[in-house]
Amino acid sequence: MFLAVTAAMVLFLSAGAYLLLTKEDASKKTIFAPEKKVESYEISLLCAGDIMEHEPQLKAQYDAASGTYQFDNNYAYVKDLIQAADLSLCNVETVFGGGQPEGYPLFNAPDSLAEAIKNAGFDVAFTANNHMLDQGGEGVLRSVDVLEGNGLEAVGSKTTPEEPNYALVEVEDITVGLVAYTYETTGSGSRRLINGLPVPQALSDQICSFNPARWEAETEKIAADLNQAQAAGADVLVCYLHWGEEYHTQPSQYQTKMAEKLIADTSVDVIFASHPHVLQPAQILYDQAEEKNVALFYSMGNFISNQRSETLGNRLTEDGILAQVDFEITKTDDAVSKIELVRSTALPTWVNRYGDGTGKYVYEILPLTGDFESLASLTASGHVDKARQSVVDSLNLIGGGYTKDEKGRIVIFDKVAWLLANGYDENGMKKES
Ligand SMILES: [Zn+2]
């Protein structure tokens, strides 16, 4: 009886309150409006380091029967990983000059390499690196055409001065803005040099390069491109930098200063970088002004090359990573309302090289995760111990204190783990005790 009366009173009060509101606040329609539609999903960006083609590799990839170069086998073990990301990027450290292919010191790759890079799952090819002038100005222009002709977005050089320095790529309704720059070498005069080769006057506005000796002013130039990309609609900003000292496993001072300045002066979300041919640390820098985490990979190492212990006496040049950043996108009423870095990882890779029994080498990029020791490439070549050593080296160089996730990737940042370690639950609510 008591319960029934109470229920009736509640009903009565509720109805009264409702009437009161509709009479007095009839204009406040928001009270009865449907809730806002909020949805969230993740996008993943993956990046590989230097793709190089030295003379022994060209020899290995040449198919005498057809008279062509075939590179697809290099990527057979990693293509699923590259294709799984929403956007995959890499540094193509050679040029497509046409004519006779050449290895070091003046690289010239067969056009079929661009096709293999696309087949492997890459979407974007960075062209800003110290070998971009190896086949002169013509090589710069032809490389962009060959890459784009194979469905890759070339970033870091362009065929006309009118085009912007940035590229915009759509990923799941999100616009990713991309900018790529390479370091310049210094000569005796004031000429702009890349690897000692003068930048052709006609291409001065079509090549993205910076002088590390003037890193502060030069970083402002790179920042301006990133800010323009943002103004043009980029939701996520990616900067690729080709920088640092060869074979140094720690960043030089200018690398650190440039990264910090870029983060302070722009809304950059991730900095991918390479050139040292060995791995350097990966970390998270906090952007105070924008209150967000920014992922920084100082050097992703070599993705594929003939630089190795047998040729250079440096086994670290055989190591690379597939760097990956995942962003959580929140949309409110179909408009992007928040973009947040939720994960930054490095999947260790290693280049296996072995003889095929006919006097030719086989090069295969192997992912060193999961049950990698049973990969046919390793069991057939007997190189399991070398690969095991690479796993140890890579973790030490990316950051010895990091752990690995269930996929075998080095975890540089994980939002949920960070929340749990800092007194929050996995939804970001502060825990009571
Ligand atoms: Zn380089």
Image (tube, rainbow, N blue to C red):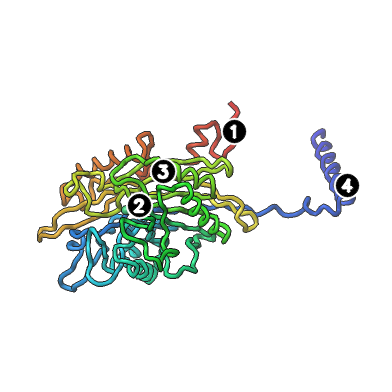
Pick whichever of labels 2 and 3 is earlier in the sequence. 2
Disc 4 is placed on an element classified as helix
Residue shown at the point (47%, 62%) measured from the top left: 165
Q: Which mark is residue 191?
A: none
Instruction: Find disc 1 in the rendering and name its residue.
Output: 430
Q: Label 3, secondary structure: give it.
A: helix
Earlier in the chain: of badge 4 and badge 2, it is: 4
Mark 1 crowd level (few <14, some 14–19, many ≥20, 10 Å Cα): few
Residue kind at label 3, given as amino acid type: Tyr
Q: Residue furthest bottom?
A: 66
Q: Which residue is mark 2?
A: 186
What amino acid type is highlighted by mark number 2?
Thr
Mark 4: few/some/many CA within 10 Å (<14, 14-19, 20+): few
The image quarter in which residue 77 lies: bottom left
Q: Nearer the viewer, residue 421 or 283?
A: 283
Instruction: Look at the image and tell me whether residue 369 can be seen.
Output: no
Q: How many numbered dots are placed on residues in this image?
A: 4
What residue is disc 3 on? Answer: 254
Whole-percent x and y of residue 36? 68, 53
Q: Nearer the viewer, mark 4 or mark 2?
A: 2
Q: CA distance from mark 4 to mark 3?
A: 67 Å
Q: Amino acid at mark 4?
A: Leu
